[in-house]
Amino acid sequence: MSDTHYQNPLTSRYSSEEMSRTWSPQTKFSTWRQLWIALAEAQQELGLAITDEQIEEMRRYRDTINFAAAATYERKLRHDVMAHVHAFGDQCPAARPIIHWGATSCFVTDNTDLILLRSSLEFVRDRLVAVIDRLAKFATDTKDIACLGYTHLQPAQPTTVGKRACLWVQDLVLDLAEVEHRQQQLRARSIKGTTGTQASFLKLLKGDHDKVRRLEKLVTQKIGFEDSYPVTGQTYPRKLDSQVLDVLSGIAQSAHRCASDLRLLASRKEVEEPFETSQVGSSAMAYKRNPMRSERICGLARFVMSLTSNTAQTAATQWMERTLDDSANRRLVLPQAFLATDAILILYENIATGLVVYPQVIKSHLWEELPMVATENILMAAVAAGGDRQTLHERIRQHSQAAASRVKNEGEPNDLLERLGNDPAFEGVDLQAALEVSQLKGRATQQVDEFVSEVVDPIRQRYPSALETTGEVRV
């Protein structure tokens, strides 16, 4: 397309060639033609007057789309399906009389969308598995690096870098389960007719209900599905679009959560996303190492999350057997939701593969807060030595507030340990032992090993080919 016309950045900048091709006009209309071929084959098998020559002619032109002719017909007919019926018929004069025989427009449009949803979910699943794999490797590599934990974005008990990464992976594991569930639930629309009653096919097959059911089964299998939806209106249930978008939104939520964490950690110089040798962080501030990839994830994720209300409203407003106000809407929402999710996961995999950790900075930040975060261990040790838990809790609270005031108001070092050491209530407590990081991080290291072996490794074994999945960050 000319540079004088708007281009969708999802295809020009962010998503992969594979996902873009999946939702391309070529794929869409080749699939329409494959559906017409599958219908003709099935009708022939059930005794309708369709010849081998007609079917072979259709097969010959399946992928040779005469786009210009179809555009001319659509300007005249104002109907995209009929435009392509005529354009296909021009190339297949022998088959022209039987193309789209007994079918309604949604036979090609909806079954095609279901096929594209199926393909796109496979792409998303494999990218998701790749991110899970890369992040799990990072978690294993950093499982022993103790770091300051946060609750309410305030310093809390220590954890490890790897354990925190497992929180990000856990979100993705839940997303993968949702993707798999949607894949398992996906059905074909197959042949349902104009209002879902199959009246036209019952007429074609001379009132033979069994043949109509066989026709539906044949077409379903020919287009690669095991089952079809038992009942529909003119379209497949628009509830499905809403459910699929919920899955994509879930992935976006997980990615946004991790990317936000990385942006915060980068500001503390603890963990950074990859930064290339010649990469520019700011056009004005040459020293900057802005977390561009994480920021882009957050931006794209917000876009994907915003689309769920759209598909929900479409599902809620399907009047009786159908309404057509979903058509233009779905042409935008479905492709762009998958293209944006694809872009998010490409970025996520790239980040997870190249995360940079700064252990000395992490250690410095941990030690700055260690006296405060060790107070729970100090409290437990003092109680074990015979003290009253509630009284000791109050003493620690008072000393902590005083030490914090000294740090904040006077810029002096944290003297909490000195204060506690001078308090008779804590006599006999080994305060230095309470600062031992290995005792403060609990089972963080062990949890990483257990999580990877019990949760991540089975996913790796289930999808070995997905472990090779990678994508290019194009800009």
Image: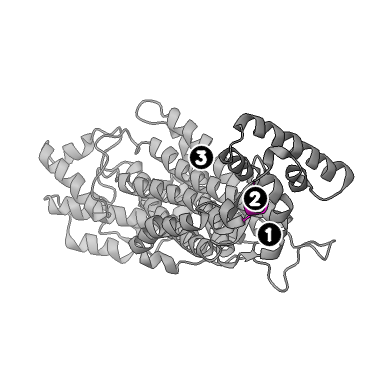
Q: Is residue 241 left or right of residue 296?
A: left
Q: Nearer the viewer, mark 3 or mark 2?
A: 2
* Label 3 residue SS: helix
Q: Earlier in the sequence, mark 3 or mark 2?
A: 3
Amino acid type at image mark 2: Asp
Task: From the top left corner, tell me how far across and down residue 339 is, in percent.
Answer: 52, 54
Q: Quadrant of the C terminus?
A: bottom right
Under mark 3, the amino acid is: Asn
- The residue that mark 1 highlights is 362
Which numbered disc, 3 or 1, marks the residue that appears first in the sequence?
3
* Mark 1 crowd level (few <14, some 14–19, many ≥20, 10 Å Cα): many
Marks 1 and 2 in Cβ contact (< 8 Å) = no
- Quadrant assignment for the N terminus: bottom right
In the image, 437 versus 180, the foreground residue is 437
Q: Magenta span covers which residues?
A: 429-436
Q: How is the image coloured?
A: one colour
Disc 2 marks which residue? 430
Disc 1 is placed on an element classified as helix
Q: Is residue 7 visible?
A: no
Residue 436 seen in the current view: yes
Considering every residue shown, the one lying at the far right of the view is: 410
